[in-house]
Image (cartoon, rainbow, N blue to C red):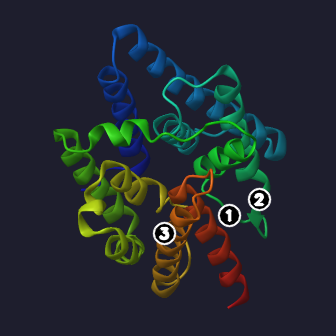
Amino acid sequence: MRIDIYNFMLVYLGALLVWGAWQAGPPAGGWIYLVSGILIAAVYALADVLWTYFRDRVWYQPWASVISGFIIALVGLPNPSWELIILLPLTAVALKQLVKIRTRRHIFNPAASAMAVAGLGGFEAVSWWVPSLTSGGAMLWVMLLAGLYIIYYLRRWETVVSFLIPYGLFFGLPKIFDGTLLFFTSVMLIEHVSSNFPGRRNRIIYGALVGIFAIFFTFLELDFDPLIGGLLAGNLIMSVLTLLL
C-alpha cells in the first residue's frame, strides 16, 4: 500500500527541518532556524491560497504549497532576514501562478525560481544547509530511503538516472552520494508539476539537460548556484521543446 505522496513529503520535509534546526548549534539558534522555516512555509501557503481564491473563488488545502515552503527553508539560508522570509515565498507563488504553459502548468520549480530571483536581486539565498548536514551521517540513509520512495511514487527513475549519468561521470561517482545532490535529485529535480513531461523520452532528455547545464554553470563560476541554474534551464528548455515537438 502506497502512502499518499503529499502526506509523506510533509512529514519527511518537516522532520528534516526539525532535525536540521536541532543539529545546527545552540538551542536558541536552532529555534530561530525552525521558526524561520515554519514562517516561510506559512507565508507561501497563505499567499497561494489567497491568490487561488481571488482568481477562482475556491478554497483548497495547500499541502503542495507547504512542501514548497519547506524546500525553500531547507535549501535557503538557515537564518534568513525578514525580507527573505517574506519575499522568497511571495516570489515563488507569483512565478508559479503567472509563468505557465498555455495556462495549464507552471514552467519553473517554484522554490528554485524564487531563490534564483533573490540571488539575481543581490540576496544570498541558497546554502543547502540541511542537506549538507546529512552528508556522511546516518540521516543520509534516511534521505536515501525517503528519496527512493518519492522517485518510485512519482515514477521518475528515468529522469534521475539521466541526470546522474553525466553529472556523476563528470564529477566522479562518489559525488552522487552527497546529501545535497541526493536531496536535489529526489525532491527538486522531480517536482511533480515542473518535471511532468509527457513520454519517457522527454523525461530522459529533461534529466540529461539539467545535468549538463549544472556542469556548465559550475565552470562558469557565476554568483549563481549551479544546481539551481541547471534545474531552471532544464525546466525552460524542455517546456519549450514539448510545445514545438
Query: Disc 3 to disc 2, how far (Cα)?
Result: 26 Å
Among the 4 quarters of the image, the one containing residue 170 = bottom left
Camera-side mark, 3 or 2: 3
Q: Position of residue 69 (x, y in %)?
A: 55, 37
Q: Which of disc 1 and disc 2 is earlier in sequence?
A: 2
Is 124 placed above or below 227 here?
A: above
Q: Mark 3 points at which residue?
A: 215
* Residue 49 visible somewhere in the drawing: no
Mark 3: amino acid: Ile
Q: Residue 107: give its label.
A: 1
The residue that appears at 48% across and 41% down in the rendered structure is 75
Mark 2: amino acid: Val
Q: Name the residue under label 2.
A: 99
Q: Where is residue 49 in the image (x, y as percent from the top left)?
A: 69, 37
Is 69 placed left or right of 97 in the picture?
left
Q: In which quarter of the image is the C terminus?
A: bottom right
Query: Disc 1 to disc 3, how far (Cα)?
Result: 21 Å
Is 242 placed above or below 172 here?
A: below
Judge the density around disc 2: few (<14), some (14-19), many (≥20) Cα neighbours within 10 Å: some
